[in-house]
Amino acid sequence: MDHGLLEMDDEHESVSKTLEYAYDDWCIAQFAKALGKEEDYNNYIKRAQAFKNIFDVQTGFMRPRKNGNWLSPFDPREVNNNFTEANSWQYSFYTPQDINGYIEMIGGRKKMEDKLDQLFAANSQTTGRDQSDITGLIGQYAHGNEPSHHIAYLYNFTGAAYKTQAMVNRIMHEMYKDTPDGLEGNEDCGQMSAWYVLSALGFYPVTPGTTDYIIGTPLFSSATINLENGKKFTVKANKTGNADFYIQSASLNGTPHSRSYIAHTDINNGGTLAFEMGDKPSAFGLLDFPSTAITGHKIVLNPVIDGGAISFKGVKTIRISSAQKGVSYYYTMDGSVPTKASKKYIAPITIKESTTIKAIAIDLKGEMSFITTAVYKKMPHNWTIKLNTPYEQQYDGGGPNGLIDGINGSVDWRKGNWQGYQKTDMDVLIDLQRPTSVSEVTIGFVQDSRAWIVMPKELIIEVSNDGKIFVPVYSSKNFLTIEDETAQVKKVAAAFTPVSPRYIMVKAIQYGKLPAWQLGAGGDTHIFVDEINVR
């Protein structure tokens, strides 16, 4: 509500939540409109467009936002904590309330058709963490999980209904069988079966909240729905074999039906929807295709504030931009709310101290975007750090300097800002740049053993004057038991007799394999570490 989207630092799974909340808000908007609540409708229909603020035109994907910018590096195949049991490929088509608006942002119906082709033809290998819910893969389409379930029907919105027919037929035959393991995914609330029942009838509700069902391809030669009002609705398909899954023509109660969708009232009134089937694509649905569109109260896109990493040394240059044409940007640098009276952005901004920048975009009509906020912190020292062991790519904690940048992670590690290590110990070398009197090193860890994140088995600190010969000054074990499943941040204060080294080596030793009683028994634990302070 404040930002016009969720960023990584707001909540974990921020992309999925932004997209799903936007659809929820569209549903509320329809209800408000039906009640004559115009003010509520105006509010919620704007919130229903939040997906536009996380769509990156450059990459063509829904992409996480962090500190006013796009998260980088970005791989649409990566499974991480910005998505719910999925990746960007699987969530980038989730705009059921405004498919026309999404098609416009993609670059038109042909571009949308091509994007769908790319999804189904892509390499099925995902990156990032292993996710058991991502199953039933055709390219990067994952039929085993709900976020993908409407996607095959989106071809209808481009006029390529025959591709929906081919893909839905393929999914019905490949992803379902009459055996104990006959479903390709988790039967959450019956959704895997519901998709099959509806698709076998020949249609599917891509956008619940509208009255349209999108036509796919009927599986049976005849199927009848016994309606609650006592009427019957029958779907007939004139087919001679399994290869006849392409619709040649259709009729509703004897009247030609050229639309690749059907209304709820058509079903509820009873009658017969009849299909002529064949083994080759036809022009059915080529010209009369469905649409969903938010046509009024269009939002101005949030500007992007690009200043790179949050922490910096020396001078930082910051740029403000947007994918939307015909807008101007206004910003503040003191944390106050920007307005049209604020300073206008005309050239890159240079800062030398810790700064909070807030920016808005205003279009030619005077409509204003939500506020984008970016916070930059100047590092309190000139130390450098060398990582002797690699961190996990998706848990970078802000990059190589993340452990000494003055930014602390929260107990909700899914938001980022923690540096993660798995299958290797943490081994880092801090260069203080000159001999410095040191008596304590404080290191922050997080433990969430249900998520396999465990305190190190041992913490070792060594010091050196030349970076070659190191002397141990601290070693300790047993900070928290693995049986303690409470998610918590634990700061270890390693105190020792004062010394004056230039270099400090910090080693955290992995717990190892998860014990037999743990749900992930035998799995490799993670060490999640953040700020290292030297006193």
Image: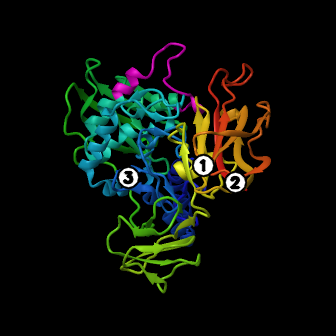
Distance Cα–Cα, label 3 vs label 1: 51 Å
Question: From where the camera sits, is residue 393 visible?
Answer: yes
The reply to whether callout 1 and callout 2 are in contact (CB within 8 Å) is yes
State whether residue 178 is above or below residue 269.
above
User: What residue is pinned by disc 2?
Assistant: 534
Q: Is residue 472 left or right of residue 181?
A: right
- Residue type at the position of mark 3: Ile
- Residue type at the position of mark 1: Ile
Distance Cα–Cα, label 1 vs label 2: 10 Å
Residue lying farthest to the bottom in this orientation: 341
Secondary element under disc 2, as helix, strand or loop, is strand
- Quadrant housing the C terminus: bottom right
Residue displayed at 42% across by 66% down: 301
User: What residue is pinned by disc 3?
Assistant: 99
User: Of tags 3 and 2, which is closer to the observer?
Assistant: 2
Residue 528 found in image quarter: top right
